[in-house]
Amino acid sequence: MTELKQIHALVLTSGLSQDDTFMSKILSFSALSDSNNPDYSYRLLLNLSNPTIFDWNTIVRGYSKSKNPNRSISVFVKMMRAGVSPDYLTYPFIAKASARLLKRELGASIHGHVARNGYEVDRISVAVLVVILEASKE
C-alpha cells in the first residue's frame, strides 16, 4: 500500500489525477488488492469528476470483503443518492455484505430491490440471495 500511495502522489504532482480512467485503476487496486484499503479507495472515488458504476461497484465490493461490511451498504445507498443505478454486478457485493452481517431483513430488502430492478432472473443474483437467506437463518 505504501508504494501505491507513492504512485498516487506522483500522479497528483504530474497532473494525471484529472484522468478518471487512470485514477479508477488506482482506486481498484487499493480496494481489491490483498492490502484491501476501501477507505482510501472511497476517498479517491469522491475526487473523481465522473465516477462510473464500475468505480462504485469496486468500492462496494472492497467494503463487502473488509472488516466492516456495513460500509458496503452505506456506499450503495450513497451511490443511488448520487443518481447512479445499480447493475447486475452490484447486487452480489451487497448480498455478500448482508450475509456477512447476518441481517435477514437487509437480505429481504436487497431481494426486493433486485426484483424491482428486473434482475431477479439473473442466475448470479438468485444464487447470492440464496446465500443470504442461508447465512441469516435463525
Image: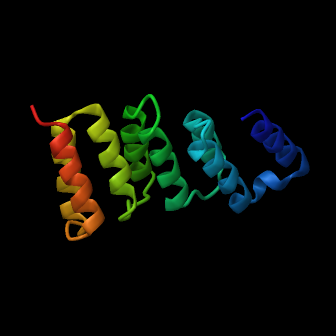
Residue drawn at x 22%, y 45% is: 132
Outermost residue on the left side: it is 138
- Residue 79 lies left or right of residue 123; in this view the side is right
Q: Is residue 48 above or below residue 1?
A: below
- Residue 91 lies left or right of residue 107; in this view the side is right
Q: Specify the color scheme.
A: rainbow
Q: Decide which of 3, 80 is in the foreground and name it.
A: 3
Q: Position of residue 63 (x, y in %)?
A: 46, 39
Q: Position of residue 104 (x, y in %)?
A: 16, 38
Q: Position of residue 105 (x, y in %)?
A: 16, 38
Q: Decide which of 69, 71 is in the foreground and name it.
A: 69
- Residue 121 found in image quarter: bottom left
Residue drawn at x 64%, y 43% is: 30
Q: Decide which of 51, 107 is in the foreground and name it.
A: 107
Q: Position of residue 65 (x, y in %)?
A: 44, 39
Tell me the quarter of the image containing the C terminus: top left
- Residue 10 lies left or right of residue 97; in this view the side is right
Residue drawn at x 21%, y 61% is: 126
